[in-house]
Amino acid sequence: MSAAQLDQARPELKGRLKAERQALFHAFREDGKPEKLLRGLRQSVDAILVEAWQAARLPSNTALVGVGGYGRGELFPYSDVDLLILLGAPPDAITQAKLESLVQLLWDLGLEIGHSIRTVDECMQESAADITVQTSLLEARLVAGDGGLFAQLEERYRAALDPQAFFQAKTAEMRLRHAKYEYTAFALEPNCKESPGALRDLQVILWVAKAADLASSWGQLATRELITQDEARQLMEKERAFKDIRVRLHLQTGRREDRLLFDVQTAIAESFGLVSDPSGPGARRASEYLMQRYYWAAKTVTQLNTILLQNIEARLFPQPTVPVPINHCFNNVGGFIDIARDDTFETTPSSVLDIFVAMTERPDIKGMTARTTRALWHARNLIDDAYRADPVNRANFLRILKAPVGLVHALRRMNDFGVLGRYLPSFRNIVGQMQHDLFHVYTVDQHIMMVVRNLRRFTMAEHAHEYPFCSGLIANFRDRWLLYVAALFHDIAKGRGGDHSELGKQDAEAFCRDHGIAPEDTELVVFLVEQHLTMSQVAQKQDLSDPDVIGSFAAVVKDERHLTALYLLTVADIRGTSPKVWNAWKAKLLEDLYRITLRVLGGEPHSADRELRMRQQEALATLRLFGLPENAHEALWDQLDVVYFLRHDASDIAWQTRCLYDKIKSAKPVVKARLAPIGAGLQVAVYLKDQPDLFARICSYFDRKNFSILDAKIHTTRDGYALDTFLVTAENFARNYRDIISLIEHELCELLTSNAPLPPPTRARLSRLSRHFPVAPSVELRPDERGQHYLLSISANDRTGLLYAIAAVLTRYRINLHTAKIMTLGERVEDVFLVDGPNLNNPRVLVQLETELLDALAI
């Protein structure tokens, strides 16, 4: 075909390709058969490529080869078409020009191609250097051109392929990929191709099996007795399910998208015919049904992946070993625990739990043999009511919880095998259950695993630098295993409707009673499950300088043991929700609450006068280190009341005094900033003559700079000056914090000097998650216990400029702000303000204020 003919044919080829794709998409929506669609897309592209190849008129010793997924014979709707143009010799100028024209033609036709142009020698060199290239060539398929040249490539590739090295490289690659996804398939937005338990894990099995010349399909793996026929059937079903989801993702988004994002989960679920069930206490969305099916499928793949890779490894690396008896049920075979007989679990059902006991008590055991893994996977069904009531099994379960090492691995394995959910039926209900609260990033069961892991890390010397205070507390905590029991049950009742803390408390109490746990220990576990949210709420929402707040909290915890246990569980719980939720400021609030409450429980009254003296003395000791005059603090401190000293740490008092001692009653605003002592963010102090819109004006500045305000302490001196302190943070500011500090001190001072009108609050775009799971905004305004101030509680989706929007409303109503507690939970904020004002006793004004605040919070 000449160039002119090719130009004429190009629109026809492009139109045909598009029409065939649309017809295949329509057929899939009608019959829902992913394999048919993938095969049809591949055949359609094959035909177009053959015509394009023929039109290119390349030399006879060249070939067009499909590699990767396209070479495997399947093509997802918006996946790349991976091609290798194989040359018999390096191209001359004419051939190079034809190759460029061919590639341009393929792009013009609308094909998303990923291509390489290599000789056989170059293919072998790249394959030896890059496991990804080696893997793609494993699935190479001739599309057009010189079959003899392709056969030469295959022959040399096979001769050079080292199945053992390939196995080691692919399994190492898989472990790195799993680490990227936190070793869990149970993220709320999993990647159906790359996440643990997804399509890529299935492909790894077939790759290493094919490289070892063991099999190239699930049926062949069963024939070679690497898996059973039933397991082969399950793998085929799960592979089809994941392919089906991936196809629907591509079609729904109109692009190559493999993540099951919240935005599309409902649409994907509905395309499967799933519907929401809004009725009843356990109301569930269609997306939740979809995702729970996904998680159960991923769990099955994870287990069968382990079995198969172990079996393939045994074929590739045969190591004759002599079984060393552990007990009458198990042997140690090369560092792996192996059942003594094929029917061990059936004849001795208690060994289903006993195997996990053995693995926690034997550090020389690295894992289970494939035979044991398979047998255990099927033996989970032996756990029934009678099994759970057996004293031997109950004792075994407690031994696992009390194990000095290996607890987290044991519980994760038990969860993966379905053993944990069988033994604790309430836990089975939360396996794969999603959480749409905008700050948990894991399913409920995986969050619980994270909390147990965090508690265990407190006990490990190698992690003491991460949590020094928690590590010190848990080292002296008696019967720390009780904390693990509380962690298992703290969220176990989620999704049932009602208060999950109250329902979980009942489950925990029944567990403790059934397992013979002492009454005082049972009481501690039940207390922790019931109150597991209390400490974070007090620390982040209430005024810790108020003796009544501390007294009430001390009355709840009762003694040091309960306080310490609740603190440890609270830290582990918050850290187990999402990497974004925990920060140094929350750590400080919780630690401050712990220390203050501990003093009260020790008989030391939380006296404002005593606390005032302590902080002043500590601040003065710090000031002396800077060589200031003996009376340098007096001018400022004489203008400050007790509330200021109770709401600021001694280090903050000393810093502000140092900055302001020679600037009292300054005509110009004073703005000072420093790295926050808590180790996160910047501390910004502002001192100037008070003005009604000051808080809003400062917030407008931080809003414009995209700083997040973590905390605000607002104070007015006796002579009418504002002394406000803000804790702010921004992404990646640590690298140039000195420049940012200078900028804040200059720009904020300039802003406060000017009389420019406040800019209107911006309605910034919500994050993707907030758009999909909007929080109904709420405003609650109520008098505090003394009737002197009002507590303003606000809950809404987080967004840039939200605090400024709130401040602007408060300014219009001439409301004075005393303190602000900003609590950000992932994509949701729960802020509490202590306010007063001349019109807050007017019911009509209160209604108008709440209405305007709700409007400011609205999406």
Image (cartoon, helix red, strand yellow):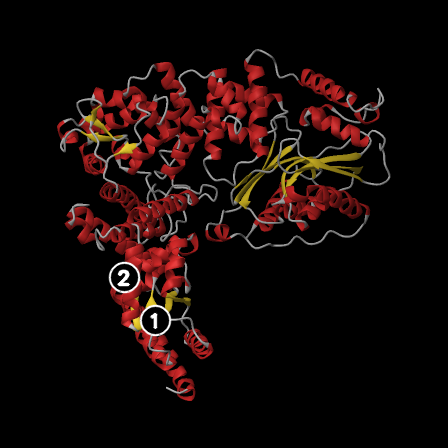
| Residue at 36 percent of width and 39 percent of height | 495
- Which residue is at the front of the view, 533 or 731? 731
**Residue 688 spot, x, y in % from top left:** 80, 38
| Residue at 22 percent of width and 38 percent of height | 377
Q: Amino acid at mark 2?
A: Glu
Q: Is residue 534 left or right of residue 16?
A: right
Q: Is residue 231 left or right of residue 2?
A: left
Name above or below for residue 642 compared with residue 659: above
Q: Amino acid at mark 1?
A: Leu
| Label drawn at residue 155 | 2
**Residue 356 spot, x, y in % from top left:** 28, 28
Name above or below for residue 51 compared with residue 119: below
**Disc 2, SS:** helix
| Residue at 61 percent of width and 28 percent of height | 543
- Which residue is at the front of the view, 667 or 745? 745
Name the residue furthest top.
603
Counting labels gives 2
Q: Residues within 10 Å of mark 1 (few under 14, many from 20)?
A: many
Name above or below for residue 759 compared with residue 465: below
Q: Nearer the viewer, mark 1 or mark 2?
A: 2
Work out which quarter of the rendered image holds the N terminus and state it.
bottom left
Among the 4 quarters of the image, the one containing residue 74: bottom left
Among the 4 quarters of the image, the one containing residue 135: bottom left
- Which numbered disc flags the more N-terminal residue, 1 or 2? 1
**Residue 39 spot, x, y in % from top left:** 27, 66
Residue under label 1: 64
**Residue 714 spot, x, y in % from top left:** 70, 35
Q: Is residue 80 left or right of residue 807?
A: left
**Disc 1, SS:** strand
Does residue 29 appear in this view? no
